[in-house]
Amino acid sequence: MTQSLLDSPYVVKAGKILNTKEMTNLEKYFAIELPGQEDLAHDPGQFVMVSLPGVGEAPISVSSSPTKKGSFELVVRRAGSVTGAMHKLGAGDTVGIRGPFGRGFPTKMLEGFDLLFIGGGCGNIPLHSLITFVLDNRSRFGKINILLGCKTPETRLFVDELTQWEQRSDIFVDSTVDQAGPGWKGKVGLITSLIPGVKIDPKRTYAVIVGPPIMYKFVIQELLKREIPDSQIVVSLERHMKCGVGKCGHCQIAQYYCCQDGPVFTYNEIRNNYEAL
Amino acid sequence: MGKVRVAFFDFACCEGCQLQVANMGESLLDVLGAIDVVEFREVMSEKSNDYDVAVIEGSITTPHAVERIKEIRKTAKILIAYGSCATIGGVNGMKNNFDLSDIRNYVYQDKARFFETIPTRAVHQVVPVDYFVHGCPVYLPEFVKVLKCALAGIPYRVPDSAVCTECKLNENECMYDKGITCLGPVTRAGCNSWCVNNGNICYGCRGMVTNPAENGAKDILEKYQIPLEWVENKMNMYNKAREQDTERNPDGKKC
Amino acid sequence: MTKSVILKKTELNHFIEALARSAAVVAPIAKGVKSFAFEEVRDGKTLSLKYIPTILPPKKYFMPQREKIQEFDRKAFRWTPVKENGFEKLVIFGVHTCDLSGIQFLNQVMGEDPKDVNYLARMEKITVIGLECNDYCDSYASCAVMKTHLPSGGYDLFFTELAGSFFVDVATPKGEAIVKGTGLFKDAGEVEKKEFENLRAKKEKIFRQEVKPANENLKGIFARSFRSEVWDDLDRRCVACGNCTNVCPTCYCFDIRDEMDLNLTTGARTRVWDSCQNEEFAKVAGGENFRGKRGARQRHRYMRKFNYPVDRFQRYSCTGCGRCSRTCMAKINLKETIDTLAEALS
């Protein structure tokens, strides 16, 4: 039963960069096309392993919705050697792509429910995939509340879209920054400060939270106060994926392999997991 | 695009690390295929002030050396600290065990007044360093690896695990099991446990891991009945200049 | 299809020589004062029949420390998956039952979807010849509680040393082919069968549960010990050298690294062993370290032996070989850890 090497989960596809855009000092946007415009066929919340030969691989969340065909989008924060090298690339360059990997957001489960999206910092990137998916399929979902936060006005992501969303009457959008200089007209404060301002019916609401580790603790506390059930609180956890296929061990969160069992979990799955939050 | 211009400079050192490069044998040809060596005192007489990469051997021990390394830093796009003297101060650091004027008089006797001196410092304690190649001497496969990273413009991470890790993978019998004290448990890996593979102990020439487990290390010493001073003395042979660190930065990031 | 045959001890040398004619043969040999390692042999003269578990387990042949999985070309932007065996055929002779269990575990993990093609390709080229421990290797072993002191598959041939001969269990067609091909074996007689049975009976008396809790209670003990003080103690003692995982027959965590050739165009992507005990193992690019404390990393190592694999693979992944305790300079001892955890819960 010899397996072909081409069956190896480590086989890389060449992804062509169609265009790029500097989003912030740290984050850069990439639109990427697979050979033959093959669909990535991902679920919102899934990630890909991006390869730069000679530099290595890094796990990157897909930021576009699967409703977008022919290409997909990544927003990459410059943090390590791969992402650093990636920031030097532009349209026409190629990166290696493996994936998509992992369990994305439970879109089927969310259907028919009211949704409360809470995004912080680069958590807004995977969340963007889900929000755009939901907005593209607006009729399948109930009321939509979107709360977004980040450190400073300069670190805000998807600003143009945010402005468009704010003008829609079928969704509620609110955003804040932790700190801002004098010119800033928007809200200043932690993301938790926005939660009291949303009206929700906890029984029929799914809350989807993506943000830095510290954010989860406080946001979840607030949501529990609002009586959203554990099983209706959805989070996406960041870990150090290396293989993407549940073998290398780097991304393990106690018994879970974040790259396969996650990165999306419901709060009741990880509430008692001493390594999760 | 021309080849990258590389210059080798030496400060307080034995130049043994540069000798390693000169002794590389055939793979030196591969290296020379990738770079243009414009200054290398040990193998050529030409000098140059025009270079992209400066490879620095030796530690900084005089005010003159401080000025010189600052000048080199201004010219070099990439600066590589090369060998223990440059990366951690190395054996030159032993000077810091003594009162500076005492040691100066001891060494230079009645000529001491002609020789200004400062406590031994590693290169990164004076100017920012882009890449570190630890070791006394450097481990050539690691140097080649770092050189490739430098040429490709990507960072090189010095392993931050103990030499034991590599030693175990080489299936060496543990020195402690033979009743011999070895600095492998607290020394940064990356040398493929070169010394132990050849029957020697680890002398700690690559510097300490960032977060050595002090309690654990003490336990080990107690269990093998090794006095702490022995290990401290052994460690200080290469690592005394560590005390000159303000913000340690072992991973090759600019400090 | 098991069948028992006999190899005279005096024929062992011929046997290894015969194997070495058609395959690379590795076997335990003495290394230094009290260490052993699997290394290549050409005859039976240098190998050690009585040995304590080798520094590294035979996993090094199934999953080498450095394994090229791809070659790349940066200019052409091409990756080519590669297989790097290092051997055409390999016979590992003298594998103890603990290590057989380790190999079985790795086979199960790497055979799970998505299958690890490189591992499986190598596995097919390896023949495993087991060797029974008639007595304990040393006091670090805990094979009785892990139930690995007796063979339960995972081999092609299994040797049990008797007074004048080896009693050999032939388990697979590969094993059968060796028996036939070398022509050195004969059928086991009544005398040898009796001698073999006596040996096994004697072993039942020698090998006794080495820790206080019984095998079936281990999972529960670990599952209830996440917040035990034992981990604080290990946090203080561990030096995070990673030896315990490197020498473990069932640790398979790895890193994937790229290295360019000097032409800066071509190069290879390599899988290398990694250790969850290393400081940076669970650190993300942003700097957050999810197992920043040594105690948390030790707990993780133990949980991966006694807790998580039971849910995922329906077995423990500790083989009781004792290597982690034997190699630990800080004297962190698996048997002690188990007993302390059990005691804290009782």
Image: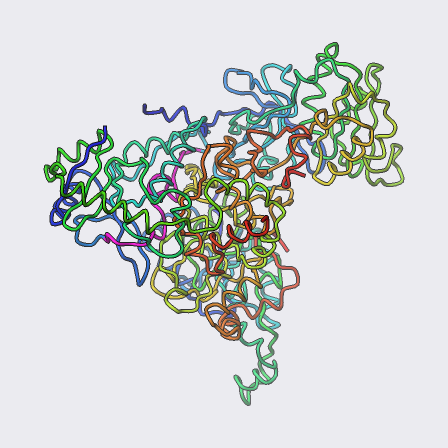
- The front one of B244 and B42 is B244
- When asked about the image quadrant of residue A230, the answer is top right
Position of residue B143 measured from the top left corner of the image (x, y, whole percent): 45, 54
Residue in view at x 77 percent, y 23 percent: A116
| Residue with the most extreme top position | A139
- Would you say residue B32 is visible in this rendering? no
Compared to C190, does B126 lie above or below? below
Give the image quarter of residue B172.
Answer: bottom left
Q: Provide residue C217's location: percent of width, then percent of height.
A: 50, 41
* Spot occupied by residue A4 in the image (x, y as percentages of width and height): 36, 24
| Left or right side of B206 for C91 | left
Residue C5 visible at all: yes
Region rendered in magenta? C48-73
Image position of A34 with respect to B5: above or below: above
Which quadrant holds the C terminus of chain B?
A: bottom right
> x%, y% of residue A137?
71, 12
Q: Is residue C67 magenta?
A: yes
Q: Which residue sits at x=13%, y=39%?
A: C190
Whether residue B135 is situated above or below residue A178 in the rendered picture: below
Question: Would residue C107 be found to the left or right of residue A99 on screen?
Answer: left
Verify whether residue B202 appears in magenta: no
* Front-lying residue, B106 or A73: A73
Q: Residue furthest bottom?
A: B110
The mark tally for this picture is: 0
Using the image as rendered, state which of residue A257 and residue B142 is in the foreground. A257
